[in-house]
Amino acid sequence: MTELLIRNGTVFDPLNRIRGEKMDLAVRDGRIAESVSSKAKIIDASGMVVMPGGVDIHSHIAGSKVNSGRILRPEDHEKDVEERTSITRAGVGYSIPSTFTTGYRYSRMGYTTVFEPATPPLKTRHTHEELDQIPIIDKACFPLFGNNWFVMEYLKEGKLEECAAYIAWMLNATKGYAIKIVDPGGVEAWGWGRYLKRLDEEVPHFAITPREILRGLCKINKMLGMPHAIHVHTNNLGNPGNYLTTIETMDCVADLAGGGKPVIHITHVQFCGFTGNSWLNVGSGAPEIAEYVNKHDHVTVDPGQVVFGDTTTMTADGPFQFLLHKLSGNKWVNVDVEGETGAGIVPFRYRRSNYVNAVQWGIGLELMLLVKDPWKIYLTTDHPNAGPFTSYPKVITWLMSKDARGRVLARINKNARRRLDLPGIDREYTFEEIAIVTRAGTSKSLGLKKKGHLGVGADADIAVYSIDVSNIDPSRDYELVRKALANAAYTIKNGEIVVREGEIVATPTGTTYWVDPKVSNDLMQQTTASLSAKFEEYYTVRMANYPVEENYLESPTRIEAVAEV
Amino acid sequence: MREIILTVKRTLNVPVECLEISPNSFAGKGLEQIRAMEVWEGNRRSRLEDVFEVKEEGGNPSDELTVRIVGDASRIRKIGCSMTEGSIAIEGNAGMYLGEQMSAGSITVSGDVGAWLGSRMKGGAIEVKGTAGDFVGSSYRGSTKGMKAGTIIVHGNAGTEVGCWMRNGTIRIKGSSGMFPGMHMNNGTIYIEKDCAGRAGAQMTGGRVIVGGYVPAILPSFNIEEVRERVKVGEEKIPGPFYVFTGDLNENGNGKLFINVAKNPHLKWCEEYLG
């Protein structure tokens, strides 16, 4: 029995309505407890902020395209090498860190749970192999369904229940967590040399529209009782004027709302929040999108905040990556198109002096600041697309301090500065709001009951930062805040101290969550029978060889969802 | 003049990497400090004095510094890495990454060198009496930033991809080169006095590759422009005549290939396409 007592910390636990109270936290056997015995190890957290461990909702940390990105970019690793210590392994960064380094760097920032948001189903075995190699943090992955042939066929034929059973089978087969949709229909269309820019254009050979795919999957998500909403990367991403597509995408499932839970999560909105009709007059659509989000409860968003500097863009949206490759002239690879999805990878440098990049930087921040309810928006950089996850502390200072973002604003492209609303926004996030957008909100959105809060019985995933809230004004002392957030004083994972003063001191294995929706036996039997015929026709693998067995994962945690069908 | 003499003590069986063998990192340091500098021998951390016998000759510490390396240093990597001043004289062979990212000063080698000679070089001069490995004056793998300025002279042969992603400066190979000299280059000059194994200037967007000897073929994405009597490299006029090709058209490039006419009779068919 291991016991810990975290004394006298300033606790921010938004889900339990604890707003910066000085209190003690007791930990027993990896859980938060009412009290501990006198033998408990004591951590003195006086003058420190205590929060639940960070939960990242969207960060590309594992899988076939992440690894292809690593192969594509030796120059990215060369500049950022971490030597081994007696506890940690050697590894490299920068924008696509190696698996072990990913775990260490997240833990140093006080993050303990990270979700990989796009895995091609056929290659998910690889994703799990990588996730298993990421130490300390808990994780999960979202399989891609937006361009899946079977999904499009089922939906076209109106076989919603069979489609639900298929997705339930796939989630079980891939040990996936949620339904991810990337450029619905668009990646398939691009495979035939066409771009889909509107929700009502037809996917060639399938006679189905992105709107039908989105609505179908949104209904199925509800039928299966999934813990998370559908996780959507919109159509028309990366094109000027696409903020309208984003609003249309949010609105197309508005009538499916209900049950007190959001039904759609739109991810990295910065990439799909452009106004204008060319790269010369592109502007921020954040105010319009924020207005929509403020008025509707069925949607949550994350910004995919741009951080200036060198990074690697990678998404399952092959068409967008091809466009970016053409725009930037940088090298690229196209992977996963041979599977059920697609993907592209392009190295990219966001420049302050570049008009479009500066506008992109502004869109993310405007969105974070204009969406009034922090429970509807979560902090991401869409790692590594808009910046590596190691920039979170920097992004947090931009949210907490008008001065901090003002300093960057003074140095960006002046035409972009003139066009952005950002200079006129005074809002500054409080520590409580930061705790919501980085842990409480995300874990609520993902339906993780034991994460993101510090109530009795919750997992003892705790981050302690040396920030003395009575002495430090984050709006002025943002540099101190950034440093403290980058190197947690303590990170505690399942009751074990894994980071002390920014140094890794232990590397336990985290768990991999997966969702197993239970549909009725009859429906499942009927669907798998027809599926096996399809597998014989389309796949290079037998259906029986396709699933990733649960015991293949090092430490799986199954979450059962009760389906309506 | 102050001179630091490093003599290789023993046969080295694994690669040795030291980022600090350069006049600028030795400058202002006493012998003891230099002997204690960190060296990686394979995966083991050791001290400079474990690999070298370190001696000093003449001068006060404030004088300009010369580093002399004696013995077979062909397993020692990154000599002269990021060097900014002074000179290094190597009496023997040197290993990979010699003069990587150097920005000023000079390096001379009496023997052969490994791959990545003068990779990402920003200035200064390197002269090698023997042969050089692959990627002379090129970028790091995956990067688009090759040699930016300076001069590299190799008296023997060089390997493949000489001047890959080269941005400016001059590389002169007095022997022959492997395949793909001037790959992706966008400015500067590569002069190969003897033969080239082929595919010169693949994906080049600017700059010049001059071949004084035989080339098996010219890439189909190059157009013949003219025949020129001579070509200038620095102050020197190299007598030709040379076929002049422009390309790589796959990259909308405007690079120039100068190919010796007399040594390449099999390219005579190109003359049909001359205006």
Image: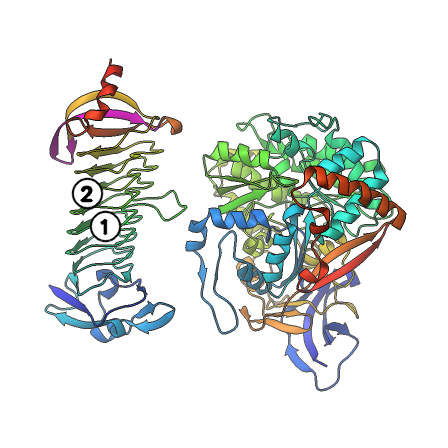
Q: Label 1, on which residue?
A: B132
Residue A389 position (above or below residue A538): below
> Looking at the rendering, which quadrant does residue B83 occupy?
bottom left
Q: Amino acid at mark 1?
A: Ala
What subunit carries mark 2? Answer: B
A358 on left or right of A138: left
> Looking at the rendering, which quadrant does residue A109 occupy?
bottom right
Indicate the position of residue B231 as horizontal and vertical percent values: 16, 29
> Which numbered marker is on residue A140?
none
The local secondary structure at tag 1 comes to loop
B53 on left or right of B199: left
Q: Looking at the picture, tell me which residue is in the foreground, A514 or A163.
A: A163
Residues in magenta?
B232-248
Q: Amino acid at mark 2?
A: Ile
The local secondary structure at tag 2 comes to strand
Indicate the position of residue B179 as horizontal and vertical percent values: 29, 40
Magenta segment's dominant SS is: strand
Q: Looking at this view, name the residue that lies furthest to the top.
A: B275
Q: Looking at the picture, tell me which residue is in the foreground, A85 or A304.
A: A85
Check disc 2: other Cα within 10 Å, few if <14, some if 14-19, many if 20+.
many
- Membership of A414 in magenta stretch: no
Indicate the position of residue A416 as horizontal and vertical percent values: 53, 35
What subunit carries mark 1? Answer: B
Is residue B199 shown to the viewer in this render? yes
Across the whole image, how many numbered discs are drawn on residues? Answer: 2
